[in-house]
Amino acid sequence: MTIPLQFSFTSNVSVSLTPQQHIETILRKKANSLNMRGENPRNYVLKVCGREEYLLGDHPLIQFLYIQETLSRDGVPQVMTVCIDNIALGSEVQYYSLPERTRLSSDQSNTIRKKKNYESSWKIEKNYSCVVQSVGGLNVDPGRPVEVVCQAGIYHGGKPLCEPRKTRVAVVTMEGEAQWNVILQFPIKVCNVPRMARLCFVIYEVSKAKNKWKGNKDTINRLAWANTMVFDYKDQLRTDGVTLYMWTHVADGTQGDDLLLHPLGTVVSNPNTESCAALQVRFSNYDCQHPILFPKPESVKAYADQLENEADDVVGTLSEDIENLRATAEKDPMYEMHEQEKKNIWASREYFRVSAPELLPKLLSCVEWTERAEVARVVRMLATWPLLRVESALELLDYAYADAAVRSFAVKCLAKISDEDLLLYLLQLVQALKHESYLMCDLSVFLLQRAFENMNIGHYLFWHLRSEMHVPSVSVRFGLVLEAYCRGCQDHINSLMRQISCLDKLKWANQCIRKKKEITKARAALRQHLEEQHCMETLSDFVSPLIPSLVCKKIKPEGCRVMDSKMRPLLLEFENVDPTGSDIRIILKVGDDLRQDMFTLQMLRIMDRLWKNAGYDFRLNPYNCISMEYAVGMIEVVDEAETVANIQKQFARFNATSVISRVNLFQWLRKKNPTEESFNKAVEEFTMSCAGYCVATYVLGIADRHPDNIMIKESGQLFHIDFGHFLGHFKKKYGVKREFVPFVLTHGFIHVINKGQRGGNNDLLDFKIFRELCETAFKILRKHGHLILSLFSMMISTGLPELSSEKDLQYLRQTLVMDLSEEKAIEHFRLKFDQAVTSSWTASVNWAFHNMDKNN
């Protein structure tokens, strides 16, 4: 539908038309219909109805995201012509730039080098060492004797560079202090310590085991940890004394794995200095009278040039095995290579540079970072390495790649990423900031620059950063980036502040209604609060935090209500500032952490992209969701959709057993789509979307699937909501798993797919097509398994309880069966598919119990 103000019509147009060509068609029809003189199409632009969004540029209509998403949701795109002279650009359309950075080192480092009063760390042949002096402020029970040990290790990219060292046992005093004054000397020379190495400490309690003769062992209880960089931001080796304010694993928000040390944790000291343990450490100066600096990049490259003639000729001797090496390098990121495989792949780096540059991440995982010669070769190699695709570059921003040259190269590869792709991966890029060793880095500059150039990117960058400002370990870093954005794009501040004011007012309303136990009283109280003058004034004329192209004119209290669930979310309705647009409906959740939902929906969006790039549209509906601050966020309302539970109840004599009937969904779709054409189309929508979500939920291990978190649109499109559990963290009741099937495929779903036909599920043509669609969807995702694993790996630092270490990624590796051939992988998936079909009754019974429990 095209609506140029008061003249509107609906027409079929070619998706290959450009916006300008479509405007010409509109104006021609308008002139003919109203018998008026034709207008110059150059004076108009196409605007999306109901949104502050314009279709600009000489591109086919189908390439615009709004057109794609609307068609994917079985909608009709609605646009209107707007005279350019009537568009109020205001002062927001501005471009800002940041000064170009040539290297990581600061001006202070360059000053030291110019004076030539420094020593190169590469000339220090002594072993790296430090003195662990004491710790204070330990939170231990003063009523019993406590013995503690301090252990330390040197890490790079999460991997140990040498064996750790630890102090002797020390007794904790009544004041929570322990003394050591012990020198810890590590089995690595200073000259071989890489630039981005970090020194990790942990204080743990040793509880002596009783009856050791029975085989009982001493138990270890981690009390506190801290990390610090070996070199500071000026490239200078730390040789002074320092107080490290320590973290507990709960305070940091990440649990890590079973290791004592926490190398993936922050290198920032705990800002809550009054209530945390404080470790006193003194670093050695190795008898040097001057500062010790890591060699500057120019010196590193010069050293690599000297080594060029010494390069081993392994490539020639391995020419027969090069394909085997490539096959090894192409295995998933979690595949553990043997030491000889690593050496051979590293020796064949020139082959990979020329023939397989996308395998750079695997090649870099073969580098021995304790050998300065290899480190120098990495710097030299990256200078001539071809730029990588976005998907491969993202992997290099993971925690495993700590080297500054590597991370700078990754950012360089992202330089030409489209705004659309940047928004798609922005969640991971913000998390990647946590893996940076210093506050000033290429990634921060890149994100800020793109945010300045596109306010849509700036909008989401702002909220992604602000949503984690409550986390002490990142509050300084994220706060500085937020401040830099607000200072550099001051015209956006008013809009963002308006959104924050609205959020505060809505949180206040939510807090007020929570005091009402009865849902009817809570709903009445909500409407009363929203109708108050201060609420009406605040909740007006603001950009939707959820979708910034939507502008809310005012709150509509009569359309708002309290939803009947534990945390009392609010369903809010706003009048659209654009009279041609429909009302804006949003769900506000207070008390629920929406970060996992947001991440899962992003992964569904990426899967949808992968499938579409391969020529398949599985009709996914990854609705919008945004986390805004601690346990506060917004969710998009999907109109004309019902939960499966509500559909079952509409056709049931008894609510509790309604899910047992296989015909309910079929009859509901028949009722909503009365013509044969519309019904067949609805079944096709259901089949495609069901296939997509079956595969997606299986691969991601999305749990807690019941009829209240699976919805169906009247058009037949099925979609899942509420993603509180994933990666196989299935809910249990009385210690027993409540879910036994790989994915939800009930006999009611199968009945719709088969268009109500009776007979064996596997014999009907429609079901065979459905099975083939599922297999195709699985093969496509498995082909991009590296990307999926990498994106999850980048999210380990979020502190999500179900994604806290590499161990959680093993579930993805198992569902994608990355270690099998494609033929074997499909056989494996077919077994899972058959299990879902033959056990469909299990899901139905579980759903019956769910409805019974909810109704009671």
Image (tube, rainbow, N blue to C red):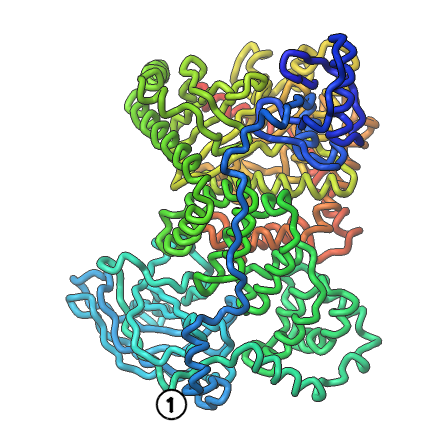
Q: Residue at x 58, y 69 (%)?
A: 405
Whether residue 210 can be seen here: no
Residue count near mark 1 (Cα–Cα under 10 Å), binned few <14, some 14–19, many ≥20: few
Q: At label 1, which amino acid type do we have?
A: Cys
Tag 1 residue:
288
Give the image quarter of residue 130.
Answer: bottom left
- How many numbered circles are shown? 1
Spot occupied by residue 263 in the image (x, y as percentages of width and height): 45, 66
Where 541 sits versus 367, above or below?
A: above
Q: Is residue 820 left or right of residue 556?
A: right
Where 775 sits versus 334, above or below?
A: above
Q: Secondary structure at mark 1?
A: loop
Give the image quarter of residue 23.
Answer: top right
Q: Is residue 404 left or right of residue 535?
A: right
Q: Residue at x 15, y 66 (%)?
A: 174
Where 846 sits versus 533, above or below?
A: below
Where 708 sits versus 451, above or below?
A: above
Q: Residue at x 36, y 32 (%)?
A: 501
Spot occupied by residue 596 in the image (x, y as percentages of width and height): 50, 42
